[in-house]
Image: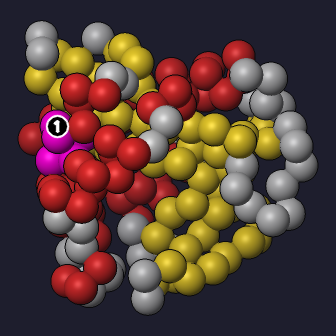
Amino acid sequence: MIRPARPDDAHTLAEVQVRAWRWAYADIIGEEHMPTVEERETRWREIDLAGTAVWDQDGVLAGFASVGASRDDDAEPSTGEVYALYVDPPAQGAGVGAALLDDAVARLRDRGHGAATLWVFTANGHARGFYEARGWRRDGRTGEWLGAGGTRYRRDL
């Protein structure tokens, strides 16, 4: 069910991402920051998909997770990052997100990372609870993104 993302997934990845953003962030960020399918699809076609895996349920993509080296300026070289984890709203609560997160952690570990970070909108209590229930802990770093506060989480791998 979890497989590497392919270039021909770009449109569906964009649709899932946009639906998930609108479901999760409608009360956190302004409409001007909401992505469109067109701009997300363009981005998916331009980026290296090597760090992205999808949940493929008989040809229907229900979610994805992207990982790689940490982009934070204070990161150790051995620190990886979960760049994105999104599940299509109708598939949420069915274990798709947990499976994708477990797979993301395994892929980071396989790449030699000993720890990983991820960023969450501080106001996104649903996501914070999801990560905390799976062993991720706030590490004290905060920031702002798209006009909303963010909190960084960390976990040893």
Q: How is the image coloured?
A: secondary structure
Relative vertical location of residue 27 with respect to residue 157 in this rendering, above or below: below
Q: How many marks can you see?
A: 1
Q: Which residue is mark 1?
A: 12
Picture residue at 88% right of the left edge, 43% below the top: 77
Amino acid type of disc 1? Answer: Thr
Magenta segment includes 145: no
Position of residue 65 in the picture relative to residue 118 (left or right): left
Q: Position of residue 31 (x, y in %)?
A: 20, 83
Residue 24 or residue 55, whichever sits in front: 55
Q: Position of residue 127 (x, y in %)?
A: 41, 56
Q: Main secondary structure of the magenta part?
A: helix
Q: Position of residue 33 (x, y in %)?
A: 29, 79
Residue 94 visible? The answer is no
Magenta range is 11-15
Q: Which type of secondary structure does the marked residue at label 1 adopt?
A: helix
